[in-house]
Every structure is written in structure tokens, then in C-alpha cells.
């Protein structure tokens, strides 16, 4: 399980939306051996996210800059069962720029 906390605020034509994802301590296989006692504890993680959006006064143009895992926290995706392989790598920092134009 995980927690997601987020908010947004609008100042004139700008919207800023920070969020925080909290992944509590979790357990999984440390490698693909499947050996008894091969379970390891993974610490609690905090993933910061941020989106900033500008919308034109007519609403026909939207520019957005967004980031997931802003501080590039290293973490793995764990399976809830033994899958015969080590934990999978997760998303690194992701920064996107989007532009939307309405004709």
C-alpha cells in the first residue's frame, strides 16, 4: 500500500501542484535464488512530484512542466509473490514538458 498527498494552488494564469507519494517499509526477495531467508526489508520512501501549468487568458494555450520522482530516489518494484527474478527497477526521475493548443 502507499499514501499519496497532493494539493494545488492557482495564481492568476498559473497552477502549481506539488504531491508526495509515501511507500512504507516493504519486503521482498533480494535476488532470484528463491532461497529460504532471502527476504529483505526495503525502507520507507518519499517520492516528490511537481507540476506547473500556465493557461492563456483565452484558454486556447496550455503549457505544462511536470516531474515525477523529482529527487531521483532509487527504488524497486516488488512483487507480492515469488516471481523467480530479482526486484524490477522502477522509474527514474521523469521530467516532461507539454504544450496544448486549441484551434
Image: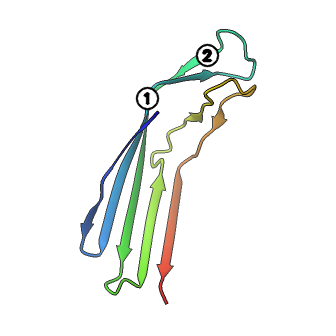
Percent position (x, y) of residue 30? Answer: 65, 21
Q: Residue at image x 72%, y 27%?
A: 83
Tag 2, which secondary structure? strand
Q: Residue at image x 64%, y 38%?
A: 89
Percent position (x, y) of residue 87? Answer: 65, 30
**Toward the viewer: 97 or 19?**
19
Percent position (x, y) of residue 90? Answer: 60, 41
Q: Which residue is mark 2?
A: 39
Q: Which residue is mark 1?
A: 24
Q: Residue at image x 73%, y 17%?
A: 34
Contact check, label 2 and label 1, Cβ < 8 Å: no
Question: Total of numbered circles in the picture?
Answer: 2
**Label 1: few (<14), some (14–19) or many (≥20) C-alpha neighbours in 10 Å:** some
Does 83 appear above or below 40?
below
Does 56 appear above or below 96?
below
Residue ranking furthest to the top: 36
Percent position (x, y) of residue 48? Answer: 41, 46
Amino acid at each position: 500500500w502507499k499514501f499519496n498527498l497532493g494539493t494545488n494552488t492557482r495564481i492568476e494564469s498559473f497552477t502549481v501542484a506539488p504531491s508526495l507519494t509515501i511507500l512504507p517499509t516493504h519486503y521482498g526477495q533480494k535476488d532470484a535464488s528463491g532461497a529460504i531467508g532471502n527476504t529483505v526489508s526495503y525502507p520507507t520512501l518519499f517520492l516528490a512530484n511537481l507540476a506547473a501549468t500556465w493557461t492563456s487568458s483565452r484558454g486556447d494555450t496550455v503549457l505544462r512542466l511536470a516531474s515525477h520522482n523529482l529527487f531521483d530516489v532509487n527504488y524497486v518494484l516488488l512483487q507480492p509473490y515469488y516471481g523467480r527474478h530479482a526486484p524490477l527497477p522502477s522509474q527514474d526521475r521523469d521530467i516532461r514538458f507539454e504544450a496544448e493548443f486549441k484551434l
